[in-house]
Amino acid sequence: IDPIYEKGYVLSHEQRKLYTRPLKYWESTDEIRKLANKLKTPEKIYQYVVSTLEYDYSRVVPGIERLGAARALEQPKQAVCMEFTDLFVAIARSAGIPARAVHGYAYTTNSKLQPLSLVSDILHAWPQYYDEARHIWVAIDPTWGSTTRGVDYFNRLDFNHVTFAILGVESDYPYPPGASAEENGKNVDVKFSQNKLLKVVYCGPIRRINRRIRRALVPKFVIVGRDKIRF
């Protein structure tokens, strides 16, 4: 796991070079450099990837081949989450924006709108870019932005994405749980508790309850001092 993930971490010159260099799957071809010069910002790169690639459900099979960014542009209708991720990372890096990939688990109740592509353990892939103003890595999901036909996974990534491995220094390492250099076997089992939390006690002041947090909470109310706040 890449340790550089805390808020307020300023990348050094050497780290910036690592996260902007071309690698296998994150090529810097003439076409990718032209796109980088045209798009320039993470959001425009995200929108381009979402609108250009098309998710190919027929490729979600064991032994799936990772195409990489250059081939994804050549075969835009044959993309899965790896191609959405690789293309974003490649264009961002060619634009001088530090970027990397995440392999992990994403909870979904609809495999058509929110598909998972890394079949052996039903894993998922999504990119991160480095926000220069806030000095943080920002996770986004162009795959689900495309398959949901417009849900914004650039400004608001949900809490359903669980990181297993971050690929930045290399494009094919570290391996996430459930995969190795020699074989792809299933040895990851993700389960969610079925127990419901009855109530949450919060001792600090509440100015505003963020809608994303509200959707993630199980209980129907929060006790604040003597007051009961219903959702």
Image: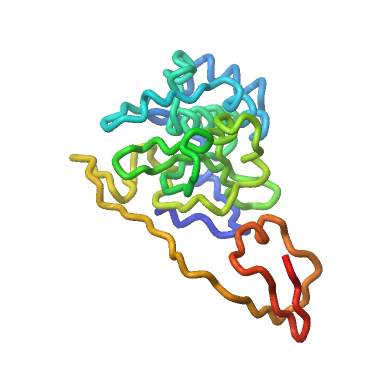
- State the residue lying farthest toward the bottom: 226
Quadrant showing the C terminus:
bottom right
Can residue 51 be seen here? The reply is: yes
Q: How many marks on residues?
A: 0
Can residue 96 be seen here? The reply is: no
Percent x, y of residue 29:
48, 18
User: Relative to 88, does residue 200 appear above or below in the rendering?
Assistant: below
* Residue at point 52%, 51% (across, down): 160
Percent x, y of residue 66:
35, 28
Quadrant showing the N terminus:
bottom left
Residue 26: quarter of image: top left
| For residue 127, side relative to residue 123 (left or right) | right
Percent x, y of residue 38:
66, 20
Q: How is the image coloured?
A: rainbow
* Residue at point 74%, 64% (across, down): 209
| For residue 21, side relative to residue 228 (left or right) | left
Residues 79 and 132: in front is: 79
* Residue at point 40%, 35% (across, down): 117
* Residue at point 32%, 55% (across, down): 189
Residues 97 and 159: in front is: 159
User: Relative to 81, does residue 155 appear above or below in the rendering?
Assistant: below
User: Relative to 56, does residue 172 appear above or below in the rendering?
Assistant: below
Percent x, y of residue 211:
71, 56
- State the residue lying farthest toward the left: 182
